[in-house]
Structure formats: structure tokens, C-alpha cells
Amino acid sequence: MTIRKLGRDTVDMYLAYLKKAMEEEPEMMTAEAVDEAGIRRRVEEPFYQRTISLLGIVDNQVAGRIEFHFYGCMQDGYKMAYVDWVYVLPEYRRQGIAGRLFQEMEKICRQNGINQFYLIRAENEAADSFYRHFPNAELSVAPICRKML
């Protein structure tokens, strides 16, 4: 497996992966359809340049992806990463792809002085088992407030 960043040169591969994910597990996706034009626009848009999407590529196809961004607390200088999305296509699961994507993300985090990362994880046995293998990690249930603007 190779890991590449989502960008102009990898957007077609990413779109093919996303379409396949939507076909195979629509209940796992956060959108109802693949917005190709919107994705192509966002790959170029300055606002989204702060979001990093790493693609796990097997046989010239995207098998999995992790997306994250950095932010910090002004008061104490603590630097964090939030993992927006992690998904591996079903046929590629249990092959170490998600683990490799997390390793690469952690490497980028260390290079940027990030103190910790967090994510809102799926609540199922497979996800719990995967995350329990992370050294120095804690699984918790946290109350969340969301407000649509």
C-alpha cells in the first residue's frame, strides 16, 4: 500500500473510491450522493487546504482514507488534531490499512507539534477492537452539542 494526499492529481481515484463506498455501505456515509463538482472545487478551495486527506492506495485504487485538521487553544497553547473521517472499503478491512493511515497521520501530527488527536468513533465491536489497540489512547463516551448554522 502507498499513501498519498488527496489533491488535484488523486481526486479521480478518490471519487471512484467514494462512489464504491456509497454503493456498498450507504448507511456509513454522511452524504446521500457523491458531489463530484463540489469535491473537485473543494480540492482547490483555500479554506479546505487546512484539511488533510490521506489516501491508502492498493493496486492503483483508493482502499481507505483518513481526513483530519489541526487547531489549537489560545489560552494554553495546546495543539490538537481532529480526525474528521476514517473509512476503509469492506474488501480491504483487516489488512492494516487503517492502522497505516493512522501511523502516517500521527507522523504528520508530530512534525507539526500536535499534542493529541481525537475523533468521534463509530460505536461497534469492530471499531472498539481497533481503537483499543492504540497505545496511550482512551475510549470514552462524551456528550456533544451540535448546532446547525
Image: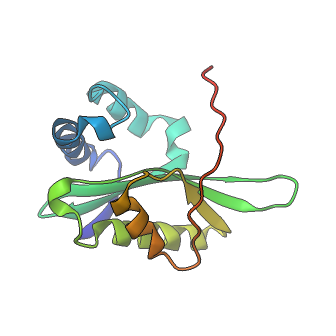
Q: Residue 44, position in %: x, y?
A: 42, 37
Extreme residue in the front direction: 125
Q: Residue at x 68, y 69 (%)?
A: 115
In the displayed structure image, the side of residue 45 where residue 125 appears, left or right: left
In the rendered image, is residue 45 in sight? yes
Q: Is residue 53 visible?
A: no
Which image quarter is the N terminus in? bottom left
The residue at the point 16 percent across, 41 percent down is 24
- Relative side of 112 to 13, left or right: right
Residue drawn at (58%, 58%), measured in percent from left and top? 118
* Vertical order, 121 against 95 (above or below): above
Taking depth in this image into account, of 19 and 54 the one nearest to the observer is 19
Up the image or down, 96 lies above or below 43; here it is below
Q: Name the side, left or right, on which 90 lies relative to 128.
A: left
Extreme-right residue of the structure: 75
Would residue 37 be found to the left or right of residue 20 on screen? right
Toward which corner of the image does residue 72 lie, by quadrant?
Answer: bottom right
Q: Residue sitting at 22 percent across and 41 percent down?
A: 25
Q: Residue furthest bottom?
A: 135
Q: Residue 58's spot in the image, x, y percent?
A: 17, 64
The answer to whether residue 32 is above or below residue 56 is above
Residue 82: horizontal and vertical position, in percent?
Answer: 57, 53
